Image (cartoon, helix red, strand yellow):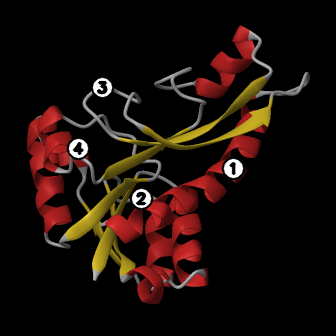
Amino acid sequence: MKNIVILISGGGSNMAAIVRAAQRDNWRQRYGAQVSAVISNRPDAGGLGIAREQMIATEVVDHKRFDSREAFDEALGRAIDARQPALVVLAGFMRILTPGFVGRYQGRLLNIHPSLLPAFPGLNTHQRAIDTGCRIAGATVHQVTVELDLGPILAQAAVPVLPDDTADSLAARVRAQEHLIYPRAIAQLLPAL
């Protein structure tokens, strides 16, 4: 079985979209793949409850309990490796990962970013798009590399920036597209894993 491990830090809406797609499209039968675990760096992450409701194993590796990024990443890597993942999926995982961690999962580590990369890597993407006067914003699924938000692009979706948009209203429309393109990008990778 091709195990998919999803990493979250918050509410888990992208994780939930991936789980729904896996169930709806029967990834287990079609690709021999399953979401085997959801791991969070925050014990209060709402997405953990969603995963438990779906009978998916959950685990917390609290980054606050570690003295360094390297120590946290090593503990996180051990938790992931215990699941023997074919793919590690960042879904709102709000930690910058060390080069050693990225190298450990090179080619099997995905992220979704709320902009049309290479525009607006990092944080506050929606407000930055509005402030810059962009007419189009969107989301990008990419492979994770040591360069933040600069890995190979696997999928993108564009949404218009409306004249009365706020960062929150734009974020809501972008998030709806994220929920479509992230599961699709994962499904396209599964036959080759």
Q: Specify the quadrant that holds the C terminus.
A: bottom left
Q: Of the residues tagged 3 and 2, which is closer to the observer?
A: 3
Q: Which residue is mark 2?
A: 44
The tag earlier along the polypeptide, 1 or 2, is 2
Q: Is residue 81 above or below residue 153?
A: below
Q: Of the residues tagged 1 and 4, which is closer to the observer?
A: 1
Q: Secondary structure at mark 3?
A: loop
Outermost residue toward the top? 132
Q: Which residue is mark 4?
A: 64
How many residues crowd around disc 4 within 10 Å: few (fewer than 14), some, or many (20 or more)?
few
Report the Cα–Cα distance between label 2 and label 4.
13 Å
- Between 29 and 70, which is closer to the camera in this rendering? 29
Kind of residue at badge 2: Asp
Left or right: 155, with 62 as reference point = right
Coordinates of residue 61 in the picture (x, y in percent): 23, 57
Kind of residue at badge 4: Lys
Q: Secondary structure at mark 1?
A: helix
How many residues crowd around disc 1 within 10 Å: few (fewer than 14), some, or many (20 or more)?
some
